[in-house]
Amino acid sequence: MIVAIDGPAATGKSTSAKLVAHKLGFTYLDTGAMYRCVTLSVLRHDIDLSDSAVLAKLLSDTHIEFGQKNGDVSVSLNGENVSREIRQAEVTNHVSAVSALASVREALVRIQRQIAANQDCVLEGRDIGTIVFPDADIKFFLIADDRVRAERRQLDLNALGENKSIEALMDEIRRRDKLDSERDHSPLRKADDAVEVDTTQLTINEQVDFMVNKVKSLTIGN
Ligand code: DC
């Protein structure tokens, strides 16, 4: 079974998708983390994004793996745990440009489909219900008010030891949503058959319970 969870930045996708997967006993795949890994590699190697040959080489040399320890999901890039580094502002500021590139998307979508091919999976991202798995068993599209999203992002950054004002974060989130929704390849878009969930007033537990119950109602045929 494939559960697709899409939506703009900081709507609670990662936190709730991880818990939904855990409650259902499904594999969790954070596709945003994969785009962040490629972005980190691009930054570290100072890659010129218009140089398609260099980018293709970088993609073929990029190996991303997910691990699970004590309920926490870690991400490694060529064997190095980069779970914290990929959340830093430098990566966040460049990830929309990198994820807009067709070659990057093709490479990562291929891997996403392979991982989810033979197992029950909750995939979280921007294009899961539209492009990666248009036939997903169930699709959710999470949204939330800009200010609430900025407040959530501020808490995430504080945990990383970074600090930014709510206004700056609102600007950043809106800029990223605009880039993600207006790009040519697989833009952020709600699939026609996705269930929209406004998380502005919901706690994480409420979001999770709502989604888990929807999935369970499918499996027991209600
Ligand atoms: O969910 P996130 O903030 O970690 O995602 C980081 C970026 O990756 C996001 O701004 C757009 C891109 N992304 C994408 O283009 N397609 C996906 N399926 C997931 C993320």
Image (cartoon, grey):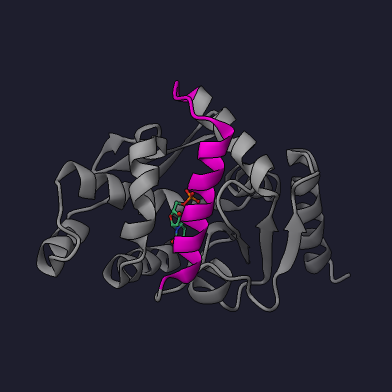
The residue lying at 35 percent from left, 67 percent from top is 105
| Viewer-closest of 116 and 110 | 110
Q: Is residue 167 magenta?
A: yes
Residue 16 in view here: no
Residue 126 at what x, y percent from top left?
52, 62
Q: Residue furthest front?
A: 167
Q: Is residue 10 left or right of residue 172?
A: right
Q: Is residue 192 magenta?
A: no
The residue lying at 70 percent from left, 49 percent from top is 145
Residue 151 at what x, y percent from top left?
63, 35
| Viewer-closest of 184 and 186 | 184
Q: Is residue 145 left or right of residue 82?
A: right
Q: Residue furthest top?
A: 161
The residue lying at 31 percent from left, 58 percent from top is 98
Q: Is residue 203 left or right of residue 171?
A: right
Number of numbered discs present?
A: 0
Residue 23 image-quadrant placement: top right
**178 is higher (above) or lower (below) than 205:** below
**222 is higher (above) or lower (below) than 164:** below
Q: Is residue 48 left or right of residue 171?
A: left
Residue 73 at what x, y percent from top left?
49, 38
The residue lying at 89 percent from left, 70 percent from top is 222
Q: Residue furthest right?
A: 222
**178 is higher (above) or lower (below) than 222:** above
Looking at the rendering, the stretch of residues picked out in magenta corresponds to 159-183
